[in-house]
Image (cartoon, rainbow, N blue to C red):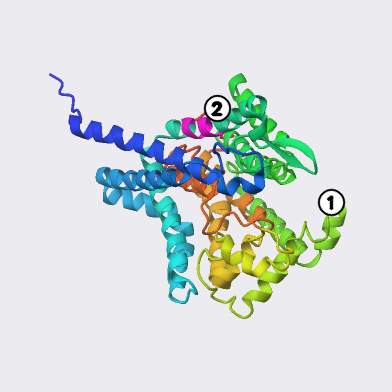
């Protein structure tokens, strides 16, 4: 007689409830931090004051994140804590230094609020990822990206007054997003996710990828196009190198050289580079903002002045940039590294860059999974984009959410590709 062990009914119900809450929390975090919303006006300058029901939604998101973490802890307890710490390990020193910087922050209340919001997403989504199977998380991510871009196309066709943005007088798409660049960036990240997770080798997958790339092109955003192209090339190159240990070091050296050259170009040869690209030498006024911020920071860039004060809070930035912008509504430095210098200083910047370099250059060769490749590509894109934008750091972004979710799957050893000594190409067949 064979006895089959079954889980008790209460455990099964709780497990299903925790998975459902994890899915809901992930979806709500995407919506809140991607800019996807129903904007009830067509004037993009007025959008910040016309996001209906955003306050209640944000409170529900915090509740969902808290319930997701507590529910996951109730199931996994110390095993969950271990997996969460593995997930967050590369960026944990950056977070902890942000907490330490509150000691000398010029606005402890503002820093505390920023760090609370960031850490809630940081820990809750790491726990949520640990509860979701690879297949379930793939379906959630594909649904969010394809659904968001598809809904935006429908809005552009049926509700052009709210779904159209203008670039130098020409109409471009923004869909259900606050700005064309936000829509384009979201679409580009979705394309990278589909390629990294190998979800483009069927007719349905190709159709979804084509939709996402149509969003990139339709947005008219050159930055989104650059993110999509470089991110996709990075994924294809990395997953081709992963099975061959002899190519690991050359690949890492090449990437480091690319990042160093890009950084030196911005510092010493920006005017020459922008001239080649046909752009203004000030990058649409960005360099003037950078100079203004650096002058304001003065000699306080060793340890900074408090996490989140210059990359997330526009009100403080307007005091610095108002004169430079001619009284315009410019409140952020448009360079994450400069923002972090003001917030957590040189030490914080080193911890931030070091954490992402670990995710980018070490993790994919240790874990050899599609999730490690995805996280690596996103860190690569984030480090490059940080030279002209400030949407990450202690600011929760879609790229940050994706990195946490992908790292969570790594901590679960999900999507394992090949043993170290196997030479076959890892994406020759789909993996669950």
Residue 369 seen: no
The quadrant in which residue 8 appears is top left
Q: Residue at x 28, y 35 (%)?
A: 15
Q: Nearer the viewer, mark 1 or mark 2?
A: 1
> Dividing the image into 4 quarters, which one contains the N terminus?
top left
Q: Is residue 84 left or right of residue 143?
A: left
Q: Is residue 116 left or right of residue 315?
A: left
Dot 2: element: loop
Along the line of sight, the residue nearer the viewer: 250 or 19:
19
> Are discs 1 and 2 less than 8 Å apart at CB?
no
- The residue wearing badge 1 is 277
- The residue wearing badge 2 is 429
In this picture, is 395 found above or below 73?
A: below
In this picture, is 289 found above or below 17?
A: below
Q: Earlier in the sequence, mark 1 or mark 2?
A: 1
In this picture, is 115 found above or below 82?
A: below
The quadrant in which residue 13 appears is top left
Along the line of sight, the residue nearer the viewer: 179 or 229:
179
Residue 269: percent from left, percent from top: 81, 64
Magenta-drawn stretch, dominant element (helix, strand or loop) = helix
In this picture, is 224 found above or below 306?
A: above
Q: Residue at x 67, y 25 (%)?
A: 157
Q: Is residue 324 left or right of residue 117?
A: right
Circle 1 crowding by C-alpha within 10 Å: few under 14, some 14–19, many from 20: few
Q: Residue at x 44, y 47 (%)?
A: 55
Residue 192: percent from left, percent from top: 61, 38
Circle 2 crowding by C-alpha within 10 Å: few under 14, some 14–19, many from 20: few
Does residue 174 show up magenta in the picture? no
Q: Residue at x 36, y 39 (%)?
A: 131
Q: How far, Cα to Cα, is label 1 from label 2?
A: 40 Å
Range shown magenta: 139-145
């Amino acid at each position: 007689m064979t006895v089959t062990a079954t889980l008790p009914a209460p455990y099964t119900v709780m497990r299903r409830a925790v998975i459902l809450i994890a899915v809901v929390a992930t979806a709500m975090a995407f919506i809140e931090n991607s800019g996807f919303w129903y904007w009830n006006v067509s004037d993009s300058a007025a959008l910040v004051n016309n996001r209906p029901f955003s306050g209640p939604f944000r409170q529900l998101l915090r509740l969902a994140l808290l319930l997701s973490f507590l529910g996951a802890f109730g199931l996994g307890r110390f095993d969950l804590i271990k997996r969460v710490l593995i997930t967050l390990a590369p960026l944990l020193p950056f977070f902890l230094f942000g907490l330490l910087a509150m000691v000398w922050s010029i606005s402890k209340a503002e820093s505390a609020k920023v760090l609370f919001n960031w850490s809630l997403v940081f820990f809750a989504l790491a726990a949520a990822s640990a509860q979701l199977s690879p297949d379930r998380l793939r379906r959630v991510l594909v649904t969010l990206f394809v659904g968001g871009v598809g809904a935006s196309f429908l809005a552009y066709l049926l509700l052009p007054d709210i779904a159209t943005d203008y670039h130098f007088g020409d109409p471009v798409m923004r869909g259900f997003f606050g700005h064309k660049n936000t829509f384009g960036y979201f679409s580009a990240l979705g394309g990278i996710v589909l390629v990294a997770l190998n979800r483009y080798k069927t007719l349905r997958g190709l159709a979804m990828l084509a939709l996402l790339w149509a969003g990139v092109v339709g947005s008219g955003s050159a930055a989104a196009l650059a993110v999509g192209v470089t991110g996709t090339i990075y994924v294809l190159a990395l997953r081709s190198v992963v099975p061959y240990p002899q190519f690991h070091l050359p690949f890492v050296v090449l990437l480091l050289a690319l990042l160093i050259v890009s950084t030196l170009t911005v510092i010493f040869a920006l005017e020459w580079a922008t001239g080649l690209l046909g752009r203004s030498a000030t990058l649409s006024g960005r360099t003037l903002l950078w100079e203004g911020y650096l002058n304001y920071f003065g000699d306080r860039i060793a340890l900074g002045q408090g996490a989140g004060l210059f990359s997330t809070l526009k009100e403080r930035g307007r005091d610095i940039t108002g004169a430079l912008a001619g009284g315009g509504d410019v409140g952020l430095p448009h360079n994450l590294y400069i923002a972090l210098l003001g917030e957590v200083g040189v030490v914080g910047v080193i911890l931030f860059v070091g954490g992402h370099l670990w995710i980018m250059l070490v993790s994919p060769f240790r874990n050899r999974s599609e999730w490690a490749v995805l996280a690596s590509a996103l860190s690569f894109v984030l480090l490059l984009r940080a030279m002209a934008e400030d949407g990450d750091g202690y600011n929760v972004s879609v790229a940050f959410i994706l990195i946490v979710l992908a790292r969570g799957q790594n901590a679960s050893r999900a999507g394992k590709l090949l043993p170290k000594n196997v030479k076959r190409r890892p994406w020759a067949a789909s993996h669950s």
